[in-house]
Amino acid sequence: MMQFIKKNYILLSLLGINILLKTIYLSTQPICHDEPFTIYHAQFDFSTIIHYLKNYNNPPLFELVLHFWIKVFGISPFAVRVLPMVFSSLSVIYIYKIGMLLYNQRIALVSSLLFTFSTFQIYYAHDCRVYSSFLLLTLLSFFFFFKLIKDYSLTTVALLCYILTNVLLIYAHYFGFIVWFLQIGIILCWHLKSKQIFKTALISFTISLLLYAPQLILVISHFLDSAKNGTWLKSPNGLESIYNMFWSFCNAPVITVLVMALLFTAIIKYIIARKKIELNVYTKYILIWFMIPFVAMFLVSYKVPMFLDRYLIFITPAFYIIIALGINFLFESKKIYYTLSIVIILLFAITTTINPFKKRLIDNTVHFITENKTPRTLVLVCPFDYITTFAYSYNQSYFKNITQDSEYAPLDSQLKSDHIYFVNDIDFNADSILHQFDTILYLDAGADFAMPNNNIKQVLNTHFKELNNHYSDNFFKIYTFKK
């Protein structure tokens, strides 16, 4: 054991720091955003999870893993967030391993520490959703891929792990196919003449595709639907969107400007001296890993919006490696390299937020409703999709009471028994329930964004008197109406 610790003390230290930073405030922020949706559906049976989630935007892998996790540990905020925290913390091991495999300990350590002190990574380590597992699977896939490229072969065990990782990757997130395309493109451009590499890659991707075959029709259907109807996102706002994306990866504006200036200078130096400098082939692969998805998703987003930080989490390891490579490329002196690297790492560490704000104070919102609700009060919530978010904070016995043959009916029924109705619009004349109550609390949970044509507030203002007893945070708004 002591020999193992001595041999792997850097990796173990990085892992320990990640676990510590990402666990301290793990359950401080309320379960919100899409976390309740994920936890709620993970409670169903294995086949039912697959059945329901085929109607939504993500494959079911994370919910299937979470299904077994919550059977053992329950659905408390700490319990459900330990899983993504572990995935995120383990990711640092493979950032370090990739740095060591392709370069040296300097590159491996700097990129690993930048990852460790990234607020963006801590945020998704605290998010009970697929993104941290998607990140880890991407790293595993590239680790085995780079090992294949460097060694010209994989052991049987490594090949099986590579195949399994690639299958899980696309069962975790549809953008896992981008990782496939990047690796296939690298082989076709640089390693087509290497029969062993080509044969191994062909076997891996063929088996992986066959194992994913049952989901292919569904993937194509989702893609065509998004291309036709668009997504919930807005198109990018030119260079501002690019800057904001870099900002999300770099913690703070000052670091963003410094990193962008560093990388821009490195590009200029390469352009000037490209006849004298041969770019390391592995550096080309890392640049492809980051640049092609970043640029392609930015451009495609003008037609089908998808340029969102969490969708790009799988390219962030390449970003941290590129920063380390940029410093190394600009300054041949080890002294200058270490000095600048320490400065940037310290800036990341100083600006790290280890308790990232979720911006959804659902606990306070539910508390306001329960405090102001009487037997003669009707609560309306829009949109309907917020039913799981509300229920998790309102009454977890309701949240856990599911039936396999109905997605939301039991939950909806129990909340209605407490006079809490989830709606997307209302008709005063048709909804006789409105006449039965003296007071109405209307919770607007991003209603105008999710349901832009809802008429709820207009109808309530027409038939009831709006009081000044309002509640508002930066997302939820509660309006009080009287007869």
Image (tube, rainbow, N blue to C red):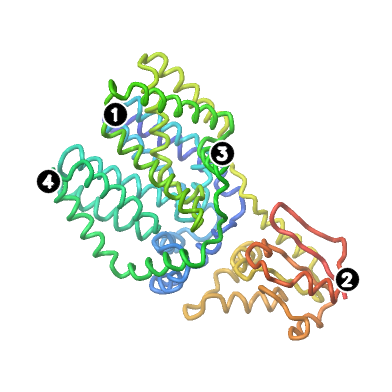
Q: Quadrant of residue 468?
A: bottom right
Crowding near the residue tagged with mark 3, few <14, some 14–19, many ≥20 C-alpha atoms within 10 Å: many
Q: Nearer the viewer, mark 1 or mark 2?
A: 1
Q: Amino acid at mark 1?
A: Leu
Percent of width and height locating residue 269? 39, 22
Label 3 residue SS: loop
Crowding near the residue tagged with mark 1, few <14, some 14–19, many ≥20 C-alpha atoms within 10 Å: few
Q: Amino acid at mark 4?
A: Gln
**Contact, mark 1 vs mark 2 (Cβ under 8 Å):** no
Q: Nearer the viewer, mark 3 or mark 2?
A: 2
Percent of width and height locating residue 17? 45, 34
Report which residue position mark 1 lands on. Answer: 279
**Nearer-N-terminus badge (4/2):** 4
Q: Amino acid at mark 3?
A: Ile
**Marks 4 and 1, Cα distance to the nearest angstrom?**
25 Å
Label 1 residue SS: loop
